[in-house]
Image (cartoon, helix red, strand yellow):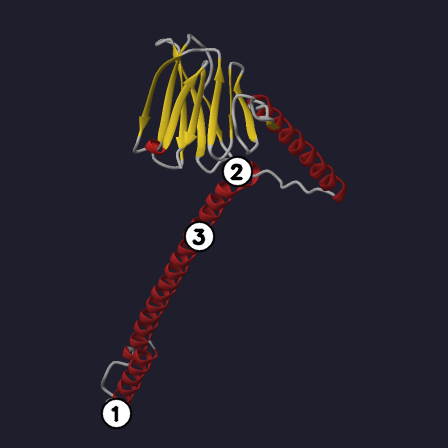
Amino acid sequence: MKTIFLFTLAVILSTSLNARENPFEATNAYEEEVARIIELNESTVEEAMREEAYIKEMQEKMNKVSQDANKNKVEEAVNKIVPVIKEKPAEKTYSKKEVDKLIKKTKIQTENRTKQIVKKELENTKIVEPTQVVYVKPRPDVIDEDAMLTKKLLDFIKIEYNDDKLIIYTDYKVSKKFTLDKENKIIIDYKAKMNFYTKRDDLESKNFMKIAVGNHKQEKYFRVVVELSDKPKNYKVSYTDNLITISRIN
């Protein structure tokens, strides 16, 4: 704009000089040109002012839009956070006295539960009477230098034994006898209709390892199984007066 103004002023001065050099030229040309330039300048200034006002208005609108958008974002974030803060329960703090009280309460509850578990286990556990093992004198009809051990397996059957001999006592009669060579066992069946659980026991002997008494109620007999330390052929089985005697053969 300054450049246009200076250029216009130069034209006016030049024209004025020409007018002075030419006395025959009309004298009102200078005033007309000055009026025209002033009008042009005023129009240019007004246009510049309108542009500046328009730019300022647009800036204000853009700032307002930006502020509204930021405000909406802040409100949206607050609306999301506030419910979470309201729903989250406040953490409770405990004093030392309250903590000690809780520990004591927990200890008592644990002890009570332990007592109940132990009591229940004891109720479910069957008490097994210990097998009595006593030393007895040899029978008059049995010649044996070594003392014999006695075991009462059930109410109706007991045994006497040592390292070399085993005697079975019962009031029931023998129905069958056989051996299992692969398992080193002598098996004796007795006629009887009994009702009892299988009984097993270990023997303190070099030649007789274990003994078991099993029930076969439907077949009307019970079975005695003697487990040996060697093959059955190395043992002798004799039956006298309802007594079964198993002896080791040297």
Q: How many C-alpha atoms fall within 10 Å of the one at disc 3: few (<14), some, or many (≥20)?
A: few
User: Quarter of the image containing the N terminus?
Assistant: bottom left
Q: Quadrant of residue 58?
A: bottom left
Q: Quadrant of residue 115?
A: top right
Q: How many marks?
A: 3
Nearer the observer: mark 2 or 1; the answer is: 2
- Going by the numbered disc 2, the residue's amino acid type is Pro
Residue labelled with disc 2: 83
Mark nearer the N terminus (2 vs 3): 3
Q: Could you say where residue 185 lies in the image, as x and y percent from the top left?
A: 36, 29
- Going by the numbered disc 1, the residue's amino acid type is Glu
Residue labelled with disc 3: 64
Q: Residue at x 57, y 32 (%)?
A: 147
Which residue is outermost to the right?
Answer: 97
Q: Residue at x 33, y 66 (%)?
A: 43
Q: Could you say where residue 34 lies in the image, as x and y percent from the top left?
A: 33, 76
Q: How many C-alpha atoms fall within 10 Å of the one at disc 1: few (<14), some, or many (≥20)?
A: few
